[in-house]
Amino acid sequence: MTAAEAVKTLDGWYCLHDMRTVDWTSWKMASREDRDEAIQEFKQLLTDWEEVEQAENGSHVLYQVLGHKADMMFMILRPSLNELTDVETAFNKSKLAEFLQPVYSYVSVVEMSQYSGNASADDPKVRDRLYPILPKWEHMCFYPMDKRREGEENWYSLSFKERAGLLYEHSKTGRQYSGNVKQIITGSFGFDDWEWGVTLFAHDALQLKKLVYEMRFDEVSAKYGEFGTFFVGNHLAKDGLDTYLHV
Ligand code: VOV
């Protein structure tokens, strides 16, 4: 059997998803001054990140996660892995981070696969996909995924044409959610434990469930999709931090 052809990808900003739980016990035990200092310092960090976003050198969002898996979910985009590491390290050195436990992280890069023609990185629409300013919509969902390679169900031995056809069907389902769900697909081959990260934003949380459910029936997901841990949360704006961290 001849090898199937790999699809070419366009790759944009590097991406870190960083999930933390809050150690509420030690947060409550800290003095009021220490808590205030931690919040102020964190807000300053967010202000610095906002400047990066305004200069279109990266983007970030913060969500408050439901359930025990995490409390805070950051998604941070930067032009290089080095800059992403600098952001992570600066945050880890902050006072607030002393009260947070890292519980999950995911490293990837914004990706567009070239199944339907050759998109150019000079096209402004393509640039917006590769270097997205993340939406600050009410809800966000993140999960990693693989494409199966087991017996007859091996994505990586399908021809280019077969994969392109399946992804075309996939995109038709996705497009029905245009305006209601925004997806950002990040590739993580060689970077993390799964092959892609899926990040979805919605104004109405139910739209996330409806889209992911409907896609389960698309052949590409039904036959070839394998999924990791799901995280879902509500947008946490800078001016909501005092309320969130008030004890
Ligand atoms: C919100 C809707 C939505 C829309 C419009 C959409 C469209 C598209 C298009 C046009 C393309 C192909 C070109 C490209 O842009 O890369 C893709 C590609 C991809 N998708 Fe998608 N997808 C959506 C949504 C969407 C979801 C919800 C998922 C998770 C699957 C699920 O079952 O839980 C997903 C996954 C992917 C992946 C992993 C890839 C890369 C596949 C590869 O082998 O390279 N995707 N997707």
Image (cartoon, grey):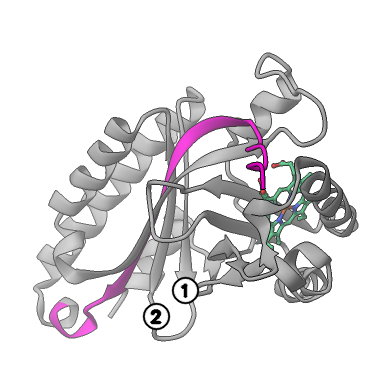
Q: Are marks 2 and 1 in contact (CB under 8 Å)?
A: yes
Q: Is residue 192 magenta?
A: no
Against 86, residue 94 (above or below) is below
Which residue type does callout 2 highlight?
Lys
Question: Residue tagged by mark 2?
Answer: 69
The C terminus - image quarter: bottom left
| Position of residue 221 in the picture relative to residue 135 (left or right) | right
Tell me the quarter of the picture where residue 79 sits.
Answer: top left
Residue 204 visible here: no
Disc 1 C-beta below 8 A from ligand 1: no
Q: What residue is at 20 percent from the left and 43 percent from the top?
A: 90
Residue located at (41% from left, 30% from top) = 51
Which three-letter amino acid code belongs to the residue tagged 1?
Val
Q: 28 or 235: nearer the eye?
A: 235
Residue 166: % across, % down: 83, 54
In magenta, the rendered stretch is 1-26
**Which secondary structure lies at badge 1?**
strand
Residue drawn at the location 76% of the way across and 36% of the way down: 115
Decide which of 4, 42 is in the foreground and name it. Answer: 4
Q: Is residue 184 left or right of residue 243?
A: right
Relative to 106, say whether 133 is above or below. above
Q: How many marks?
A: 2
The x and y percentages for residue 84 are: 32, 38
Q: Residues within 10 Å of mark 2 (few under 14, many from 20)?
A: some
C-alpha span from label 2 to label 1? 8 Å
Residue 180, given in percent of the width and then of the height, sits at 80, 58
What label does residue 65 carry, if any?
1
38 sits left or right of 156 in the view:
left
- Residue, far top: 122
